[in-house]
Amino acid sequence: MRKVLLLGLMLFLGSAVAFAQNRVITGTVTSTEDNLGVPGATVLVKGTTIGTATDLDGNYSISVPAGSNVLVFSFVGLRQQEVSIGNRTTINVALEPDVQALSEFVITSYGDQSKREITGAIASVKGEVFENLPVQSFDRAMQGRIAGVQVTSTSGAPGGTLNVRIRGVGSINAGNDPLYIVDGVQVASGSLSGQGPQNALASINPNDIESIEVLKDAAAASIYGAQAANGVVLITTKKGKKGVTKTKITAQEGIVQPLNLYEVMNATQLATIKRDAYINAGLNPANAAATYGNPEDPNLQSYDWVDELYRQGRLSVYDVSVSGGDEKTNFYLSGSYTNQEGQIVQSSYERATGRLNVTHRPNKKLTVAANLSLAYQRTLGTIANGNFVNGPFSAGFTMRPNVPIYNEDGSFKADYPSNHNFGYNIVQGVYEELRRGTSVQTVSNLQANYQITPWLSWTSYFGLDFSDNRDENNRPSTIPVFSSFGGQSFYADRRNNNFNTNHNLNFNKKFGDVHTITGLAGYEYKGFQSEETTATGRGFANPTLRYLQNAATPFAVGGFFTEFKRIGVFGNVKYNYDDRYDAEFTIRRDGHSRFGAQNQWGTFGAASVGWRVSSESFMQDLTWLDNLRVRASFGITGNSDIANFASRTLVGNTGQYLGSGSLGLSQLGNDLLTWEESKTINLGVDWTIFNVRLIGTVDFWRKDSESLLFDTPLPIDSGFGSITRNTGSVRNQGIDIDLQTVNVVSGKFQWNTGFNITFLENELRELYDGRDRIGNDLIVGRPISFWYTHRFLGVNPANGRAMYDDANGGYTYIVGESTLQYIGSGLPTSYGGLSNTFSYGPVSLEVFFQGQFGNLAGNQDMFNLEDWGASTGNLRTNQLSYWKQPGDITTVGRPYEGGQAPGTSNIDTFSTRFLSDGGYIRLKQVTLNYVLPSAAAQKIGMQGLSAFVQGLNLATFTKYTGQDPEVVGIREFVSIGRFPNARQFSAGLTLTF
């Protein structure tokens, strides 16, 4: 019966086609580069929505209705071609490389601009590059993919925050984060929760992003004036397009695994080194055996605390989107759900997002748009980033392996030895202490554009970044250290309201055939408010009744309110002559409530020029050269990222006086305080050669940060520690290189490569009042982050003692101020990424590496885990190679209980022993993707179907002694108890209807 119905349907359709005199056109689409078929090329009947795609060999077949006589052929990277049909039934087309693809428009501040006309340093990443990657935020998706942009994790926790630095670190006390703008909304970065990492930028689903543009120099960013010194990141979300409504569904499941865990000793191994440490210190080894066990006891049992804390977690990501439009209205509607378990038990991240982007054109002059989003995030966190007794990343590895985790009945062992970790059973703590952060956030906007004349328009814009967060921390009385006060619950409710609006007059007119002038003038207002209320209660009759109304004792209350306001006016003019010469000028004036009453206003601006050399007549004989362009720019931007009231004289609560509250001065004000300024010069070259087979960009840049917002020390008798002033300067300079190549195109096989690298130098050039150094922390002529410590020379084979450079060509066992010396920089001197994509027909494989080089990194975990047997906790197994007798060649010295043998410095004295090369190369991503041919997909009622498997953080090549060189931080000296990144594997399907 089914076959009969299908046959009847085919006969009906055939008769309908014949009646309408439709024609079937067939042919092949090839590329002039290699004369091979182009798979997946689009063939459309002009003026209709009728279309098809070529098969793997470039062949197509399309039914053309009566009255239509033109076919449109297109493919990414090839020039679109329109062909008249006439009386033909077979049409073969050869598409040429599309050098004009360089005219692709990118988002630039308050509008967009052709790449061919850009005179500043702007880098772009399309959303398709990181689509379906199991990352929670777009800042993580940028890592290693943009020259001049360094992205590092502050925590490997799911949903964790990141450090993003554009062209170095320019400020000492003010912020170094770039300005983030999502569809025009100036969003706040950082963590929404205090109970676990919860990235404020994760409210934007990466699969909703169309593109990310990074404005790196002053010419590109100066229109944002007082907030652009650290660069600008512009995120544009997807919009609907005219045509048939498209539905896209993606689902993926995966696993999360711990990465590079420390290998620690079992009970027998720890008992052995502790016995020798006691003997070497002249102590009774029986006391060591009583605490750590007898190493000669064959029945000495080991308990694996690390295995109890770490796990293989689950990862689930689901996305759905519907988009489409007609002549008047376009829409994009999406929803997503993410749930990822952390590598530590009880840690997890959950997110749900929804988005609606609508653009409507009620008439030819007016366009209105709304981009609305809503996100829910929930984090179950764990203590990290510090040497905490209840932190699994610090205490977890040091727990004594001879001490049981559980009692025989399966309950947690409550009497962990009090002389280590304050008697805290870390496994019990992680399972029973609740650390939860929940937030609801919207990043939304409304916009209207009115076309006054064909060359003049008006735009009004309103944007909102609003978040509401609740933090919960419950420490039940079942954990012994909290039992004395009956357990404790802490709650914090926090609300952030971040609003901006701008109103612009836009001008775009061409004079004659060769002169084009584009400009805008605008006004902007931004207001930010944040408030928090906290409460803590103690004494709960039952640990399950953890809410504050059940507390016997109201223990503490707190809260704050803070705000700032900023207004600005700005203008920008661009001039293009004959598609060869470009010039751009920007000026902006800002007023900010953060600065002193006498210095609240600042003026910023930039100028830039560009020359398309390849358009000159004398270059036309160079057939291998598709495009060559040179750029130059200079500009000044500002940094206002300090505390909201840093310029004000403040009073604060000083306690009680005669039973009443009292106030006193808590901060000295500075009415002259104003912006940091960054002066940037940029020289760039862009080229495309060999029929778009090699595309490259090189930028040479220098950024001088001057009039730093610096906390200057005050004399002790002033009664205050410091005052914020404008003083000092820092220089960053370097080279950004970006290359995109098509290495091989042969039949169905293609190999593409993307490579970027940045080389940079950082130097402190000036301090306050002519000083050349502040202690051993800041020295003029050095980077603003460096190591100044004792140089460890190794272990003396004769006696097992630690040797240090005495700064006079010899060695010493005792260090002091005289043996301190400059060791090296804590800042990377280069970083970048390398991607290779191999495709054969419907199968593609992407392999992506990311890395950084040239920095020394500290590993403070060694204080606990590599102290040569001196402390009371467990150690890494690499300590088993310790010195035992004269002549031993080793890097682990003679164990000594307490760590300080007579005539030596304590073994935990910080030195280069705790430093290692922080550079690394990481196999960041491998993705294998299969796309079902469109003809086969259409047979099962779909427009497309693809399946993929992928892995993240698969391998790391480094000399760093810690778990993860990425989470050390860019300016931070040490890494202790940090949440490392995890290895991830996932598989998924994408269905398109």
Image (cartoon, rainbow, N blue to C red):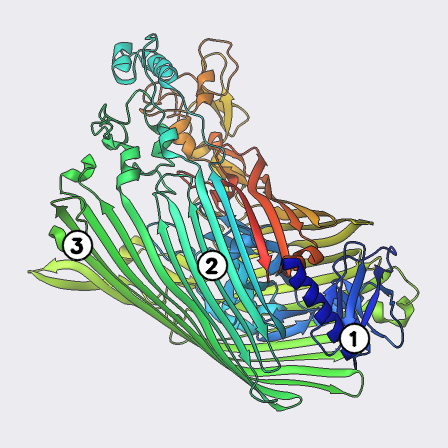
Which amino acid, mark 3? Answer: Leu
Q: Please give left or right for residue 101 compared with residue 274 in the image.
A: right
Asked if residue 498 shows in the view, the reply is yes
Quadrant of the rendered image containing residue 189: bottom left
Q: Residue at x 51, y 22 (%)?
A: 794
Where is residue 942 shown, x and y percent of the image? Answer: 62, 60
Q: Residue 548: which disc?
A: 3
- Label 2 crowd (10 A; few <14 / some 14-19 / many >=20): many
Gap between marks 3 and 2 measured at Cα: 34 Å
Which amino acid, mark 1? Answer: Ala
Counting residues from the N terminus, which is met first, the one under dot 1 or under dot 2? 1
Quadrant of the rendered image containing residue 423: top left
Question: Which residue is at the front of the view, 611 or 80?
Answer: 80
Where is residue 310 shown, x and y percent of the image? Answer: 40, 34
Describe the element under mark 1 as helix, strand or loop: helix
Gap between marks 1 and 3 measured at Cα: 78 Å
The reply to whether discs 1 and 2 touch (Cβ–Cβ < 8 Å) is: no
Counting residues from the N terminus, which is met first, the one under dot 1 or under dot 3? 1
Quadrant of the rendered image containing residue 608: bottom right
Which amino acid, mark 2? Answer: Ser
- Label 1 crowd (10 A; few <14 / some 14-19 / many >=20): few
Question: Which residue is at the front of the view, 711 or 225?
Answer: 225
- Label 3 crowd (10 A; few <14 / some 14-19 / many >=20): some
Query: Of tags 3 and 2, which is closer to the observer?
Result: 2
Q: Which residue is mark 2?
A: 336
Where is residue 575 shown, x and y percent of the image? Answer: 71, 80
Q: Residue at x 76, y 79 (%)?
A: 20
The reply to whether discs 3 and 2 touch (Cβ–Cβ < 8 Å) is: no
